[in-house]
Amino acid sequence: MSCERIEVIYRLSVPAAQATHRAQLLAIEQSIEIPPEAVIEPRVLDEVMARVERIEAQTDGTSLACVALSVESVGDDAGQLMNMLFGNSSLQSDVEVVDLEVPSALATKFGGPNLGIDGLRRLLDVPRRSLTCAALKPIGSSVAHLSAIASTFARAGVDVIKDDHGWADQRSAPFAQRVAACQRAIDEASETRPSGRTLYAPSLYGTHSQMQRQIELARGYGVRMLLIAPMVCGMATLNALRREHSDLAFLAHPALGGNARIAPAALLGKLFRLFGADAVIFPNHGGRFTYPRAVCHAIATNNRAIWHAVRPSLPTPAGGMNVERCAEIVHEYGPEAMLLMGGSLLIARDKLTHRARAFVEAVHSAGRPVAA
Amino acid sequence: MSCERIEVIYRLSVPAAQATHRAQLLAIEQSIEIPPEAVIEPRVLDEVMARVERIEAQTDGTSLACVALSVESVGDDAGQLMNMLFGNSSLQSDVEVVDLEVPSALATKFGGPNLGIDGLRRLLDVPRRSLTCAALKPIGSSVAHLSAIASTFARAGVDVIKDDHGWADQRSAPFAQRVAACQRAIDEASETRPSGRTLYAPSLYGTHSQMQRQIELARGYGVRMLLIAPMVCGMATLNALRREHSDLAFLAHPALGGNARIAPAALLGKLFRLFGADAVIFPNHGGRFTYPRAVCHAIATNNRAIWHAVRPSLPTPAGGMNVERCAEIVHEYGPEAMLLMGGSLLIARDKLTHRARAFVEAVHSAGRPVAA
């Protein structure tokens, strides 16, 4: 389904009788930001002002309003799409973003993932199965400790090893030293694997310019994947890096994404994908986060759905999972997903090798067809 | 009041009996992100893990928890402070940020406003009175129309003329052409003013690298102030630009700031100031936004309070105000504030000159001492 404008579904928490009026104010707020009677140039009303397409009263007393934003108002800037989508309205307590659809041309402009799920598989040289991901924690650790953990994870056959998203350039493990040591440890361990390879995803921090330098440095050590938190650094930064480094993979972290003012299925499911996330981390249900099961499934569905010419993103459920739940999670999300664990592996302490192998084996065996 | 750690007050929406346990989980989530029993290096528990300092049950059934984050975990990156403050917890529905305090050394590192209120007054060459600000709207307008409005506002004696925050590089008024034309119109009009000058604040968009180029270009036209939306582009971007351009003023817009998950008094009142906003726009009560009066006053108080060695930011109430309310708003916020209007001026259409003069006169006269 395509459209000529950016179509946004907002939830309005106002009495149904006021919904039409509220939606009209919302359309003005998210576009021209002045009363229509103040507009001098007629083209602005016809072409630039957002339009209320339809309103549907919901059984819970809220209303859903479909508002069509002009593509012209967004241009080709990811930050500007966020601004027109929810900039001012995020300050108003009675509005939430439920869903959005963008025209094909705009999707092509933002471009989506560089590699997507198939590209990640080629980079990892692994067949069609659920992938495994482990995190280097905790912040405050020494480089020696982190690289030892990285080595253990890689020897166990973990597919992707990521920095904790709390890693920046802290003095206990500065970026340059951490990345050099962990990538080397993973490279050495990868050679012991019978098949496939392990990717290391260091955490980017700071501004676009700083990240450009971090990537340049990391590339020198052989890094092919980066962890990035688009709501912390700005969506435009992810989208720019994706353009500048079309051979690299980006693993997006939901930090600062909020709980529900922009529905996770829209934010993590669609917008992260649109702006270039090859894989999207989200807090899985049943762990220490509160996204319901249906929300998690909607994120994964949007990550993988056929959508314009945009490659799919790899859904990466995370957050308080453990080895015992692996089979359940593999069956739930299917082979086109990556399971991310951190604390529940590291709690094994001196038995980390054993625990990491159990994680990998649990994921692999859950995906294998049962012998007849 | 100073502290050795970053002290954050979180509101926990859990039963009081669970508050201590919940606060402990929060302290872990916002620092080491693994169970303490999984930590191998003892220094991490002693120095890096966040600590619950105290918990206070509230009459509304929630609890306030003071959690002390280590400075080491933040380093000198503004994005990383946001990450450690609320990165993962923003995904959890039962936590909000109410307030924060930072050590003096960290405040000095981030640096705050380049100019602050006094510096803005010097730049504008105006005495101690409430300032006026008007917005160039709507998006979709032509450059000719915008520069005509800018000229009208400047001739009326408006102190600061800002782009609408919806301006990026749209084809109807590309950044370079818009900035050149509007700055020229304002310069010409400024010459007709008996005293003071008018500053133009064009809207920055995209990434840090793009903004660097925009500022370079704008500087060439004589621009001394920039509009920036830190929650869209990332706090680190504001902080980096502030360092790179210590003679420029930054006017921060709250777009994408959310309604209350991070209390506006903390986000707009303190964090925007800390990272370098010389003036902070916030939605005033009684307009089309929903921040209560007490929240607006808390933002202004935090913008202007004596706070380490950080210069004060100029509170800039905005959003659906009108000329008739000017006296009330001037009395409410006092002379150290700037009143921002957009639509309520532009709705005058061919009487814009008259309306803009009425705005300026209303603000000036409200601040004058009454003759005895």
Image (spheres, coloured by chain):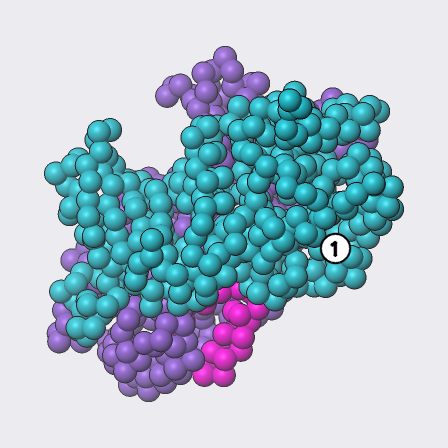
Chain colours: A purple, B cyan
Residue furthest front in the image: B372
Q: Quadrant of residue A183?
A: bottom left
Residue at 16% across, 58% down = A324
Residue at 34% across, 64% down = B71
Q: Residue B125: tell me if it is visible.
A: yes
**Circle 1 marks a residue in which chain?**
B
Q: Residue B210: tell me if it is visible.
A: no
Q: Quadrant of residue A196?
A: bottom left
What x and y, as percent, mark residue B242? 58, 61
Number of marks drawn: 1
User: Mark 1: which amino acid?
Assistant: Val
Q: How packed is label 1: few (under 14 Cα within 10 Å), some, or many (20 or more)? A: many
What x and y, as percent, mark residue A239? 57, 59
Which region shows up in magenta? A198-222
What x and y, as percent, mark residue B206? 62, 56
Query: Which of the pair A23/A205 is nearer the observer?
Result: A205
What x and y, as percent, mark residue B27? 24, 54
Is residue B172 highlighted in magenta? no
Looking at the image, residue A51 sits to the left or right of residue B238; the answer is right
Query: Which of the pair A73/A103 is nearer the observer?
Result: A73
